[in-house]
Amino acid sequence: MNGINSESRNGSELTFAFEMIQKEDEIIVKEGNKVDLLDPNADNKFISATIRNIIESKSGQQLELLVQGNQNLKL
């Protein structure tokens, strides 16, 4: 008989392990850098914005953003 003959096995000496790796990008808070802002007026939509000013306060940093293409956005 020609061809490949295979035999079934109940186990193997080799094992593979997988682990989930999730990498989060850092946001570099610096004037002029671009960020994505979650649109409060639409579900799951993001808006491009540029950091105009960084204000230090007791509660942390507050960002003043310039929103691209929408002058009427109310936050």
Image: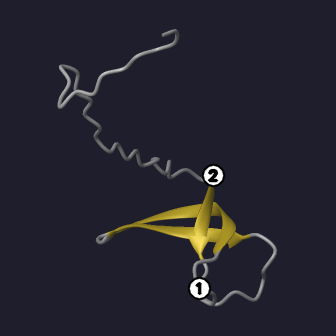
Identify the residue shown where x is 51% and y is 12%.
3
Identify the residue shown where x is 27% and y is 30%.
16
Identify the residue shown where x is 78% and y is 83%.
71
In front of the other: 43 or 12: 12
Residue position for label 2: 33
Spatial separation of the CA atoms under disc 1 and disc 2: 24 Å
Identify the residue shown where x is 40% and y is 44%.
23
Q: Which mark is residue 65?
A: none
Percent x, y for residue 68? 76, 70
Question: How many residues crowd mark 2 within 10 Å: few (<14), some (14–19), many (20+)?
Answer: few
Model colouring = secondary structure
Q: Amino acid at mark 1?
A: Asp
Helix, strand or loop at disc 2? loop
Looking at marks 1 and 2 on the same chain, the residue that comes earlier in the sequence is marked by 2
Do the residues bearing badges 1 and 2 touch, measured as CB atoms within 8 Å?
no
Q: Nearer the viewer, mark 1 or mark 2?
A: 1
Q: Which quarter of the picture shows residue 6? A: top left
Residue position for label 1: 43
In front of the other: 39 or 57: 39
Percent x, y for residue 25? 47, 47
The outermost residue toward the right is 69
Helix, strand or loop at disc 1? loop
Q: Which quarter of the picture shows residue 37? A: bottom right
Q: Which quarter of the picture shows residue 70? A: bottom right
Question: How many residues crowd mark 1 within 10 Å: few (<14), some (14–19), many (20+)?
Answer: few
Q: Amino acid at mark 2?
A: Asn
Compared to 8, does 3 lie above or below?
above
Compared to 26, does 70 lie above or below?
below
Compared to 62, does 6 lie above or below?
above
Q: Horizontal placement of 50 versus 4: left or right?
A: right
The C terminus lies in which quarter of the figure? bottom right
Q: Horizontal placement of 18 versus 34: left or right?
A: left
